[in-house]
Amino acid sequence: MKNFMDENFLLQTQTAQELYHNHAAKMPIIDYHCHLNPQMVAEDYHFKSITEIWLGGDHYKWRAMRTNGIPECYCTGTDTSDWEKFEKWAETIPYTFRNPLYHWTHLELKTAFGITKLLNPQTASEIYEECNEKLSLPEYSARGMMRRYNVEVVCTTDDPIDSLEYHIKTRESGFEIKMLPTWRPDKIMAVEDPICFRKYIEQLSNVSNTTISTFNDMLDALRKRHNFFAEQGCRLSDHGLEEFYAEDYTDIEINNIFNKVYGGNKLTIEEIRKFKSAMLVILGEMDWEKGWTQQYHYGVIRNNNTKMFNLIGADTGFDSIGEYTTAKALAKFLDRLNTRNKLTKTILYNINPASNEMIATMIGNFQDGSIPGKIQYGSGWWFLDQKDGMEKQLNTLSVLGLLSRFVGMLTDSRSFLSYPRHEYFRRTLCNLIGRDVENGELPIAEIERISQMIEDISYNNAKNYFNF
């Protein structure tokens, strides 16, 4: 019987252990997609308690607590203390067996705080005090956490109207870890609500110092912001989509649609889809001009619980996997860019595992021999960001593509304690490959090449692909 979370956690064979300890574990972290607060990095924020760094903003934990019968006041409430919230999380932990939260929780306690005790109601007070005591030390600041986990680069997620002042401040401070912005233009496509869209265009106008009254004016303002992001080191864009859009449209139609929604009028479903289709292409061409990598996260149904959305807002744990028939639209969208010779490096992330094979075969349609792994199948995302989801993504990519060219893992997190997700991924990867070697499915004679593949997926591929 193996011990829980010892040095060989998840590593079921001798080869897996050697691949992880001698190769994967030593590689730095490139976290090319996350939602960290740039201000915290710029100001080297010191966390008040383990509750703040651990439970603040973590909708994974909130969902589990609600399911365990914990009242909302202990999740997102403002009238309950940090200790009360932590105590309720500790109460929930013994009910999370086989949920990835159980692994993540104890891996974070171990790697960040050196705590190997199991979290439960009996140990809660002791662990709470020990974590808080360490968090008061200088090396447990926001930047200290990044150093602790051997982070080399992080790419945050930023709206085109963001000032990027904290990225600039961080760079000018001489902080040795790169924090780069990522272009996230979702709001420029959100034309369902004319009032919100008009307000956003006015903000874009102000920050770009551009008078906007036409569609082309809006594009001019966007390009100014796109250039500004590039000046601040941006190398990636990211799009959060329900589905892909590839309707046929004319320039005249898009100009008229813009005028209609900018004037405060509600669009038809057909007009909304045409506008989104046009913007995806235009934004993709802008990224191609800069040599950026474009990322697409698609398939989520967001804010399903209207009551809770009205009470506490978005990104609070009320989203789910969606069902969309989007393969033809995705193919048509990529083909449009490719036909114009303007398809840049692209990463596709699906949240519905039913799309695994579709994505893995789709990327092969647009590889052109110019860049190794130019079109990527992104790592298991959100609800698939766990051992089972990672294994399915790795297996699908292996069977239908080239796993060796995969750019690897990211945290997609708001927490400075989420870097062990890279370790979790690397252990899972090494376990899969190690098992293949010991089963005779990969040759032990090629162990040097296999070891290099592990290092590449853990770090080198991302380093080279993004030109960091």
Image (cartoon, grey):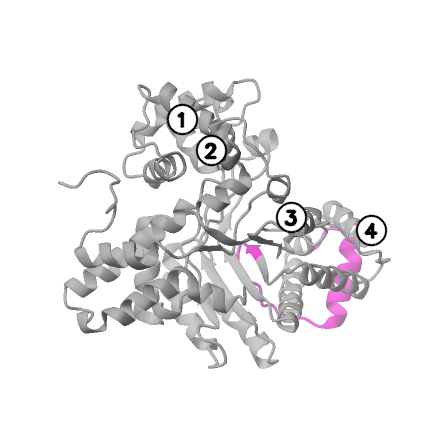
Q: Earlier in the sequence, mark 3 or mark 1?
A: 1
| Residue bearing mark 1 | 89
Q: Measuring from the top left, give residue 265's x and y in whole percent.
A: 77, 51
Residue 4's x, y, as percent? 23, 38
Quote the CA–CA distance across marks 2 and 3.
23 Å
Q: Residue at x 34, y 37 (%)?
A: 110
| Residue hosting label 2 | 54
| Segment tinted magenta in the rendering | 239-267
Circles 2 and 1 in contact, beta carbons < 8 Å? yes
What residue is shown at x 33% (from left), y 71% (from top)? Answer: 400
Under mark 4, the amino acid is Asn
Cα gap from disc 1 to disc 4, whole angstroms = 43 Å
* Foreground pick, 178 / 393: 178
| Residues marked 4 and 2 touching at CB (< 8 Å) | no
Does residue 57 appear in this view?
no
Which of the two discs, 3 and 4, labels the residue nearer the N terminus? Answer: 3
Q: Which mark is residue 170?
A: 3
For the residues bearing labels 1 and 4, Cβ distance under 8 angstroms: no
Looking at the rendered image, the quarter that the N terminus falls into is: top left
The residue drawn where x is 41% and y is 37% is 112
The residue type indicated by label 1 comes to: Trp
Of 358 and 387, nearer the camera is 387
The count of marks equals 4
The quarter holding residue 409 reads bottom left
Write down the residue under mark 4.
206
Figure quadrant of residue 402: bottom left
Is residue 104 toward the left or the right of residue 292 in the image?
left
